[in-house]
Amino acid sequence: MTVYTSIDSPLGEVLLVGEESPTAKGGTALASLSLPGQKGAAVVRDGWRRDPAAFEEIGNQLTSYFDGRLTHFEIEHVSGGTEFQRRVWQVLEEIPYGRTATYGEIAARVGTSAVGVRAVGTAIGRNPLLVVRPCHRVIGADGALRGYAGGLERKERLLGLEGALAS
C-alpha cells in the first residue's frame, strides 16, 4: 500500500511517499521525498492513502537534520531505479555530512569514464530521495553549484546548513 503525507520544512512543504514495510522503523519505507516546484516531483495519485503517522520517524529525523542535530539518516527506503542509478545513489549516500564531491569523482567511483559524467549527472537528477540521499553535496569540478532538482537556492541552503560552503 502506498502512503503519503506532507510536512513543513525550511525548504517548503515536503511530500513524503512510502510503502508500508514491516521491517522499517515506523512501518514505512520511504519511496520519495519531493520539494515544491521540484523537477520530476512525485504527485499524489488515486489509491494512495494519506497517513501522517506512518512518517513520524522520518519526520523526526528530518526535523533533527534541519535543526543541525542529525548528520546521517537512518531511514529504510524503497529500492528503485536502474542498476547504474543505484550504484550512483550508493556513492551519494557515502558522501559525508559537511563535505562535497564532484560529478567527476562520482563517475570515477562508479567506474565510468570522464565521458560518463553526463550519465552520472542524469542518475543524480533522478534521485527520488532529496535531502535524505544527499545529491545536494555534488558540485561542479570548479566548485560551482550545479543542477539540483529542488533548485540551486535550496542546494545552497542545504550546503550552508551542513557547513560545506567555502566562505
Image (cartoon, rainbow, N blue to C red):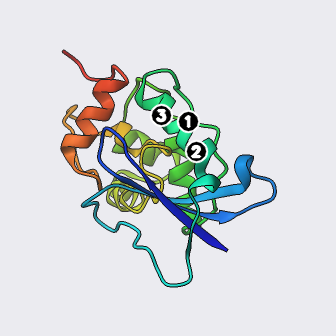
Amino acid tagged 3: Thr
Seen at 46% across and 60% down, the residue is: 128
Q: What x and y, as percent, mark residue 141?
A: 25, 37
| Quarter containing the N terminus | bottom right
Q: Which residue is mark 1?
A: 61
Seen at 56% across and 56% down, the residue is: 52
* Residue 106 vs residue 38, the one in the foreground: 38
> Is residue 141 in view?
no
**How packed is label 2: few (under 14 Cα within 10 Å), some, or many (20 or more)?**
many
What is the spatial separation of the Cα atoms under label 3 and label 1, in whole angstroms?
A: 5 Å
Is label 3 in contact with label 1 (beta carbons under 8 Å)? yes
What is the spatial separation of the Cα atoms under label 2 and label 1, in whole angstroms?
A: 5 Å
Residue furthest right in the image? 22
Is label 2 in contact with label 1 (beta carbons under 8 Å)? yes
Dot 3: what SS? helix
Residue furthest top in the image? 167
Seen at 40% across and 45% down, the residue is: 135
Q: What x and y, as percent, mark residue 76?
A: 67, 50
What is the spatial separation of the Cα atoms under label 2 and label 3, in whole angstroms?
A: 9 Å
| Quarter containing the C terminus | top left
Q: Which residue is mark 2?
A: 58
Is label 2 in contact with label 3 (beta carbons under 8 Å)? no
Dot 1: what SS? helix
Dot 2: what SS? helix
**How packed is label 1: few (under 14 Cα within 10 Å), some, or many (20 or more)?**
many
Dot 2 or dot 3, earlier in sequence: 2
**How packed is label 3: few (under 14 Cα within 10 Å), some, or many (20 or more)?**
some
Q: Is residue 87 left or right of residue 150?
A: right
Seen at 56% across and 31% down, the residue is: 72
